[in-house]
Amino acid sequence: MQRRRRLSASAPCLGPRHLLTRKTVVRILAENKRAVGVELMDKGLERITAGEVVLSAGSVHSPTILMHSGIGPAEQLRQHGIAVIVDSPEVGENLQDHPMVPVRAYVKGDLGYQAAAHGLGSVKAGLRYFVTKDGPASGNGIETVSHWNPSDFTAEPTIQCYHAPIIANQELSPTGERSGITFELVVLQPKSRGWVRLADSDPTSMPLINPNFIGEEEDLRAVVESVRAIRKVMAQESLAPVIEEEMEPGPSIQSDAEIGEWVKRAVTTMWHPVGTCRMGQDTRAVVDARLRVRGVDGLRVIDASIMPNITSGNTNAPTQALARHATAMLVGDLKRT
């Protein structure tokens, strides 16, 4: 925060740097199993050489770039005609994300931010923020969050619940004009694992992504229990008078089986992907404890993809913390060489 305004991480962290934008990294250049630069694509191909290469493209694109560079599961790379530099079988595997299931209910009157999210209401909210720096446009729309275990409220939390004072769609954006509330139920430690794999040998193609949400029975059970718990919350005397009707999953869905089938249809991402370039001490880990890519000198991955396990909460701050620590390690290693 600065002067009552939220800041992007780029503002305090990047500062005055030379940045190349609107360019696609095609691959990492390697000679004798040492990273020596990157190949970029804009109007044509260009190369930038460097003594050290740091890959920070995120949990989808970091493994994708590694695989297009010949670092990844050997069999998969050969299928796409990519020469194998290092057979690293877990590049792109171990994908974890926080699966989110939205329980929505209409409320009485004009409570919440639904009116401020559309048409003239959004204009008024924008003008209010411009003048007073407060109101609906001054935040992200979610003022409160709770953490709890639906099977035992005294135990370690297994669910994170965002309380959004709007009717939100699958992308968490306001939808419709009727006022309401969305309880966004998030599994904090999902057991399910997905993957990111190459679609073809074209580095500009999007990779194949399988998040495998609710792929494990334990994850499904946690969400079903949380749906039942949040229904009990809506029935409490402090909240029941303002609830008009449950929109989704809806009163017709009651049994565990019915809730479970609805969960599988409704589940979506919380935009917290991690794990596809897993850090570890074992030989299958993609990077070591200093985030150096195994088998290739002069190459590191510094982003959320290196997390072996997802955090029990939002991944933004932990990613910034690991980046700060990794930068210190990188500087320390360079000073010793």
Image (spheres, rainbow, N blue to C red):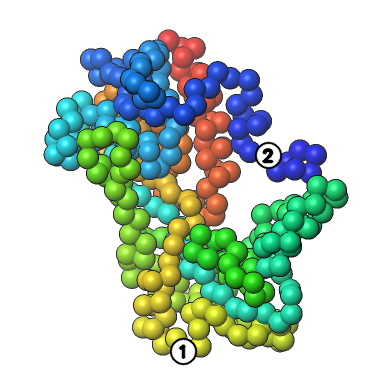
Distance of label 2 from label 1 (alpha carbons): 44 Å
- With 81 as the anchor, is 318 left or right in this view? right
Count neighbours of disc 1 (C-alpha within 10 A) and say few if under 14, some if 14 to 19, many if 20 or more.
Answer: few
Helix, strand or loop at label 1? It is: loop
Q: Residue furthest right?
A: 132
Within the image, what quadrant is residue 164 found in? bottom right
Identified by mark 2, the residue type is Leu
N-terminal of the pair, mark 2 or mark 1, is 2
Taking the spot 52% from the left edge, 69% from the top edge, the residue there is: 102
Identified by mark 1, the residue type is Ser
Comparing 280 with 322, the one in front is: 322
**Residue 286's x, y, as percent?**
31, 36
Q: Can residue 139 be seen in this view?
A: yes
Q: Name the residue under label 1.
A: 252
Helix, strand or loop at label 2? It is: loop
Q: Residue furthest top?
A: 337
Taking the spot 43% from the left edge, 39% from the top edge, the residue there is: 58
**Residue 49's x, y, as percent?**
38, 13
Count neighbours of disc 2 (C-alpha within 10 A) and say few if under 14, some if 14 to 19, many if 20 or more.
Answer: few
Q: How many labels does the image show?
A: 2
Within the image, what quadrant is residue 247 found in? bottom right
Q: What numbered label is drawn on residue 7? A: 2
Above or below residue 175? Residue 204 is above
